[in-house]
Amino acid sequence: MRTKIVVAVACAALLFYFVLIGRTGVQLIGTGQWAGVLIGIAVIILPLVGAWAVARELLFGRATERLGRELAERGELPVDDLERTATGRVDRAAGQAMFERYRAEVEAAPGDPGPWYRLAIAYDAAGDRKRGRAAARHAVKLRAQQR
């Protein structure tokens, strides 16, 4: 719940920023000078791109949360019993072993979103967030295709 509150506050701050910047863009366009108009258009486009990116991330978060909840209800999420370092990070060897196990699951059932979701968790445990997010996106895509 705390995460959702932080996300809501961040989105509200971004919305305020986008409105402020958009208003500035409109004022620049209103100058009538070609430099002001071009800068004004660019200033309006940037918040639109930012809003699109935020919306995309929020939809991704909601979809992965929903898929995670479904898997948890079926008891298909991995138990977090990995060895950790003194700083609380997952031990590299333990994360690698987890990754290998779930990679084999994905190879055995490439069309099933469950193994892909577990692989995303394993990637994250192994410290590879970029591939973890890609695996989670693929899991969400597979789940949407099943519906």
Image (cartoon, rainbow, N blue to C red):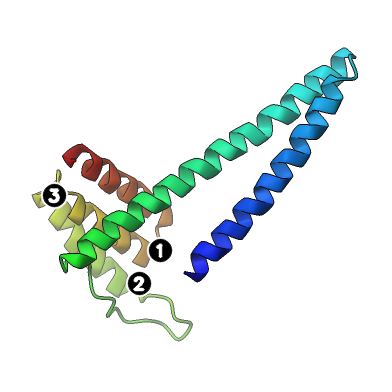
Mark 3, Cα crowd under 10 Å, few <14 / some 14-19 / many 20+, is: few
Distance (Cα) linking label 3 and label 1: 21 Å
The quadrant where residue 92 appears: bottom left
Q: Nearer the viewer, mark 2 or mark 1?
A: 1
Q: Is residue 9 above or below residue 92?
A: above
- Left or right: 126 with respect to 40? left
Residue 80 locus on image (x, y percent) = 29, 76
Circles 3 and 2, Cβ within 8 Å, touching? The answer is: no
Circles 2 and 1, Cβ within 8 Å, touching? The answer is: yes
Query: Which badge, 3 or 1, is on the more N-terminal residue?
Result: 3
Question: What type is the residue that disc 3 sits on?
Answer: Glu
Which residue is at a point 43% across and 76% down the rendered structure image?
89
Q: Which mark is residue 107?
A: 3
Which residue is at a point 40% across and 58% down the rendered structure image?
128
Which residue is at a point 90% across and 14% down the rendered structure image?
33
Tag 1, which secondary structure? loop
In the image, 47 versus 35, the foreground residue is 47
Query: Which badge, 2 or 1, is on the more N-terminal residue?
Result: 2
Question: What type is the residue that disc 2 sits on?
Answer: Arg
Across the whole image, how many numbered discs are drawn on residues? 3
Q: Which mark is residue 127?
A: 1
Mark 2, Cα crowd under 10 Å, few <14 / some 14-19 / many 20+, is: some
Residue 145 locus on image (x, y percent) = 20, 37
Q: Which mark is residue 92?
A: 2
Residue 20 locus on image (x, y percent) = 77, 40
Distance (Cα) linking label 3 and label 2: 22 Å
Is there any visible trace of residue 131 in the rendered image? Answer: no
Tag 2, which secondary structure? helix
- Left or right: 18 with respect to 87? right
